[in-house]
Amino acid sequence: AAHKAKQGSSMAGSGVRLVLILLLFRFYAAKSDQEQSAYEDEDWGDGLRVLTTYRPDNCEHRARQGDVIHYHYVGRLGSNGEVFGKSFDYDSPYIVSLGHGRIIAGMDRGLMGTCLWERRRITVPPHLGYGERGVGSVIPGNSTLMFYIRMIKIERNGYSLGEEVSMEDMWNAGLHAYGQGNWADAVEMIEKSLELFSQYQNEAYHCLKKCKQTVPKLSSKEKEVVESISGSNKLVGQFVKFAGRNKCIRDCKREKLSPKLQSPDRQLLEKFRQRLPFSYLHYSYYQQYQTEDGARCLFTYCAYNDNPDPDICSKGSEYYRMELNLRKDEYLYREPGQLPHHSAYLEGKKLYEEENWLESTEAFERALGLYKEALGDCLLLCEDIVNLDLSQEGIGPQKLEKFDDYQFVVDSMEFYPLMTKIMKEVLNCSVSCHNRTATVHGVMIDKYLLSHFHYLQFNYYKIGMTNKAAEAAATYLALEPSDEVMASNIRFYISNLKVSPENFTPWKEYVTMGTILQTEETLLDFAVTGKVAKKKGVRGDPAMAPLHQEL
């Protein structure tokens, strides 16, 4: 009886499982019917029919002509449903360049517009398939074919849609499309690379600012390493201390950026900071008759690039001005071609010419503050060069001492060339920052910082603020010690207006800014030429010695 009861219980359990399986089958079958009923079996003309059985909610990427597509398929005969082929037999998807006649015409057309991960049933009539001849004994002549496909990968211009990509991936894909004359693709890829650049730039700036004041917390072992290396080599010692801040920057980037965006190529990054992509975008938009977009890109490239192609800028600007009826002083930009400190400077200059001394003074004072802020932001990003160079290159061929993942070999042959390379790149970046922040509408204003004090000195004098005028004049002369005109002004203030020499106190922060630029230009010149060039207008000019002595 116990055996029978157990057997009955087992049979009952089996019955329950069978009911559950049937219910699940009906549920999924109903769901499948609902999925299929959500789309119609579409007539694509010429007897070709396409039924979408599944499409992801986010259909951002669709296959188009020229894409290399990877898809799985099961092929059946329309007459009896017999399978004549499937990709699973080869343990890999079918891979083909779409729209180039490398597969039967029905599939070449029926796969167009397929989303990544979409599933379709493509019904191909005989004349778009294998026609009257068929394929041996596998596909009889005049057969209608049904392909059940699933799209698993779409490659375009060398990269996979839907996958995480780097700035380099998108840039190279854009250049490839540009070289092929595929202007729409070139715009899409290069615009995407600019989005990634902007994302990287913003987060890198945030990390550099966050870590600027970071003092590395060293373990006792790390302190020993720092002290031992610092004792034998000051340069290496300073570098080891810097590594702590560098670790903060790297950790911050890892938190804020995806792996493929954390360490872009240094040279490519500089091209983007010089707005080189806009020169390619302008021509790609021009080729598609998108004149205004082309103009915005051209003006942006010419305004931000340190050394733009003069032919492109002059001839291109002339063309777009004519096409869009722009005045000579009218510009179209993708980014502000006139930064806030430029606007304040130009306003001050205009008011000065109108002899509105008070408002001109206020404008120039505002311009100086905004200029210092803009220059500081640009110079901060120059530190990213060091971070990227150290992330992309190793130091020392052997493990002698280790600190924060860096190996230091004091007096190694690799250490000094790397330091030289980094210092030269930082100098170049810094000088470029000074040039860019002094450039308005693509034209660099000569002695930009200095000219603020030229105007301010006279403005202060005209509104009766002689002590302030003395400070502005002293700042000017500190930056340009050989300027005879400003020296004459100072003598006038002393002899005629009885301003005490003690009042000729330069504005230290701006003198420091100007002195650093002059020093960096000299160092960069030496790094490039190997020679130290004597520059005019530096301290020590004998003709100016008495005045400097007096002040």
Image (tube, grey):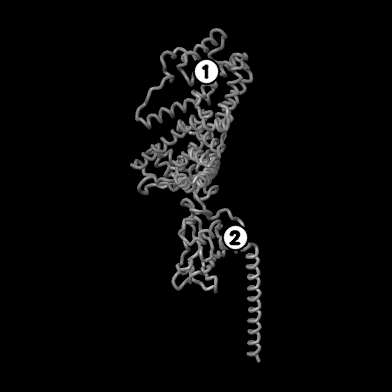
> Label 2, label 1: how many angstroms apart (C-alpha)?
72 Å
Q: Which residue is drawn at 56% across and 18% down?
A: 455
Q: In which quarter of the image is residue 2?
A: bottom right
Q: Name the residue under label 1.
A: 474
Q: Residue at x 59, y 14 (%)?
A: 461
User: Is 249 in front, or is 67?
Assistant: 67
Q: Residue at x 55, y 41 (%)?
A: 202
Q: Mark 2 points at which residue?
A: 55
Q: Nearer the viewer, mark 2 or mark 1?
A: 2
The numbered disc on residue 96 is none
Q: Position of residue 353 (x, y in %)?
A: 59, 17
- Figure check: 522 above or below 25: above
**Does residue 324 appear anywhere in the picture?**
yes
Return the disc, 2 or 1, that comes first in the chain's sequence: 2
**Does residue 250 appear anywhere in the picture?**
no
Q: How many labels does the image show?
A: 2
Q: Which residue occupies the extreme front position in the image?
A: 132
The N terminus lies in which quarter of the figure?
bottom right
Q: Where is residue 512 in the image (x, y as percent from the top left)?
A: 50, 26
Q: Position of residue 499 (x, y in %)?
A: 56, 11
Residue type at mark 2 is Arg
Residue type at mark 1 is Ala
**Is 233 placed left or right of 356 in the picture?**
left
- Figure check: 118 above or below 164: below
Marks 2/1 in contact by CB < 8 Å: the verdict is no
